[in-house]
Each structure stands twice: as structure tokens, then as C-alpha cells.
């Protein structure tokens, strides 16, 4: 299992320090939660923060865009240093166009199934994506309770991948902890996002090691 700590739970006054810390603790990916206050009822940060995190890390930068009309901004997130850009198809009026922009920039592209959405919203694009993100909380805030029923979406993603030879990695986002990572793995996920579990841990290095298992 790869581990992607969410910078949403880091100390916003010490982002360079914290992004260096997760690398030292053994994290694999830097997860950046971008929120616009429209698609979700919360606002976080935009492209300049992604650029700053990239400048302070050797890890893959994963930009999770919870924004309306992502097709307007995906190119900018690529230019500012994101290695993987994921967005919510239900927030977009041009899903194919957004995928095409990310690919034209030579970056990896992913689609997100929010916790109130069916698997069918990503189905038409599965052959083209590098990452399938399955939300196990409703997008918008860190520190929410894990929704185990949403592992059905992970199972569907894993099944479709196996049956069709697709190559996307499956990332589970929301409420992940040491206590549920084994069921997430059993469902077929490859990556877990962990915000509070890592940054509120008394021993983040040990927490990341346990999430790797
Ligand atoms: C929710 C975000 C998640 C969240 C994860 O909208 O996409 O990445 O920050 O935080 P925890 O692990 O605390 O649920
Ligand atoms: Zn996220």
C-alpha cells in the first residue's frame, strides 16, 4: 500500500517543514486538497501552494481538485508542478477536455468518485485514466468518519481493471486509519490518503509504516 498524507491536515504556517517531514517519515505521495468553496463548502489553497510544495519535496505531487469547472484550471495545476491531477467529473462540463489537457502536459490524470456518486460517472473514462480516487467521506473536510460501504466502489474499480486490463491505481480518500487499512487493501486499493491519521499521530513515522502494511 502506498501512503499519501494530505497536506490539508498539516500546519499551514509551516507547509515547507511539514512536506519535508512526511518524506522523512516514509510517505510516498503528497496529497494536496484544493477546494473552491463552490463544489465543496470549504476553501483551502490553489496553484501557488502546489508550486511551493513541489519545490520542497522529491515526492509525487497529487493534486485533488474539488473545484467547479476543473477544465479551466487543470492545465495551470500541471504547470505549477502537480504530477497527478485528479478531479470530480460531476463538477465538470467537459470531462474529456480536462483529461486531454492533463495528458497533453505529460502529467497523470485521475477521476474521483465522491461519496454521494455512483461508479457509473467514471465508467466511460476508465481506459484513459492513471488513477481512480474513491472518496470514503463526502469531499470538503478532513477528519470525517470513514464510510465502509463505499468500498463497494473500490471493488467495482478493481473488478473493471482486472476484466479489461486497465492500468489505473486505486486511491482511497477519507477517514483512513490504521484500523481500516486492511479492509481497504482487501477491497483492491493501491494508495491510501491519510490526513488526520498522520498529522495528529504521536508517532507519524510508525503510523505511516502501519498504513504501508
Ligand atoms: C476530503 C479530502 C481528504 C481529507 C482526508 O475532502 O479530500 O483528502 O483531507 O483527511 P482525513 O484523512 O482526515 O479524512
Ligand atoms: Zn483529497
Image: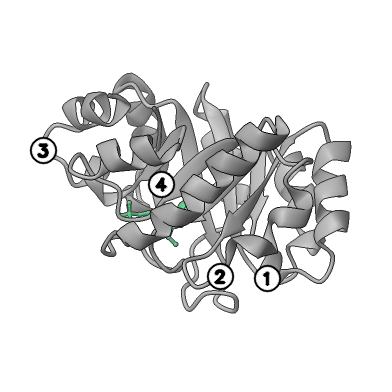
Q: Are marks 2 and 1 in contact (CB under 8 Å)?
A: yes
Provide the secondary structure element on which disc 1 rests.
helix
CB of mark 2 near ligand 1 (< 8 Å): no
Whether residue 32 appears in this view of the structure is no
| Residue drawn where x is 31% and y is 57% of the image | 148
Sooner in the amino-acid sequence: mark 2 or mark 1: 1
Q: Nearer the viewer, mark 1 or mark 3?
A: 1
Q: CA distance from mark 2 to mark 3?
A: 35 Å
Left/right placement of residue 66 relative to residue 20 reads right
The residue to which callout 2 is attached is: 117
Q: Which mark is residue 164?
A: none
**Mark 3 residue element:** loop
Query: Where in the figure is residue 1, as x and y percent of width and height?
Result: 39, 27
Q: Quadrant of residue 50?
A: top right
Marked residue nearer the N-terminal end (2 or 3) = 2
Which residue is denoted by mark 1 in the rendering? Answer: 90
Of the image marks 1 and 4, the number of the one nearer the N terminus: 4
Measured in 3D between alpha carbons, the distance from the residue under mark 2 to the one under mark 1, in whole angstroms, is 8 Å
Q: Secondary structure at mark 4?
A: helix
Nearest the eye: 57 or 205? 205
Q: Is residue 91 visible?
A: yes
Question: Mark 1 Cα within 10 Å, few/some/many (few <14, many 20+)?
Answer: some
Residue picked out by circle 3: 202
Locate residue 80, reporting x and y percent: 70, 42
- For mark 4, what is the residue? 7
Q: Position of residue 92 (x, y in %)?
A: 75, 68
Judging from the image, what secondary structure is the residue with disc 2 in?
loop
Does the beta carbon of the residue at mark 3 sit less than 8 Å from ligand 1?
no
Location of the C terminus (image quadrant):
top left
Give the mark toward the camera: 2 or 3.
2
Q: Residue at 40% of width from left, 46% of height from top?
A: 6
Amino acid at each position: 500500500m502506498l501512503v499519501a498524507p494530505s497536506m490539508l491536515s498539516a500546519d499551514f504556517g509551516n507547509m515547507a517543514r511539514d512536506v519535508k517531514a512526511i518524506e522523512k517519515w516514509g510517505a510516498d505521495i503528497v496529497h494536496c486538497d484544493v477546494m473552491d468553496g463552490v463544489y465543496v463548502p470549504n476553501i483551502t489553497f490553489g496553484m501557488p501552494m502546489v508550486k511551493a510544495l513541489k519545490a520542497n519535496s522529491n515526492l509525487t505531487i497529487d493534486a485533488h481538485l474539488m473545484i467547479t469547472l476543473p477544465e479551466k484550471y487543470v492545465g495551470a495545476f500541471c504547470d505549477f508542478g502537480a504530477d497527478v491531477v485528479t478531479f470530480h467529473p460531476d463538477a465538470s462540463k467537459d470531462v474529456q477536455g480536462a483529461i486531454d489537457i492533463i495528458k497533453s502536459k505529460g502529467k497523470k490524470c485521475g477521476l474521483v468518485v465522491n461519496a454521494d456518486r455512483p461508479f457509473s460517472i467514471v465508467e466511460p473514462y476508465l481506459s484513459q485514466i492513471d488513477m481512480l480516487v474513491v472518496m470514503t467521506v463526502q469531499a470538503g473536510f478532513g477528519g470525517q468518519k470513514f464510510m465502509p460501504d463505499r468500498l463497494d466502489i473500490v471493488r467495482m474499480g478493481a473488478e473493471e481493471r482486472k476484466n479489461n486490463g486497465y492500468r489505473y491505481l486505486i486511491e482511497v480518500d477519507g477517514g483512513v486509519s490504521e484500523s481500516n487499512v486492511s479492509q481497504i487493501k482487501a477491497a483492491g486499493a493501491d494508495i491510501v490518503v491519510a490526513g488526520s491519521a498522520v498529522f495528529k499521530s504521536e508517532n507519524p513515522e510508525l503510523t505511516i509504516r502501519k498504513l504501508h502494511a
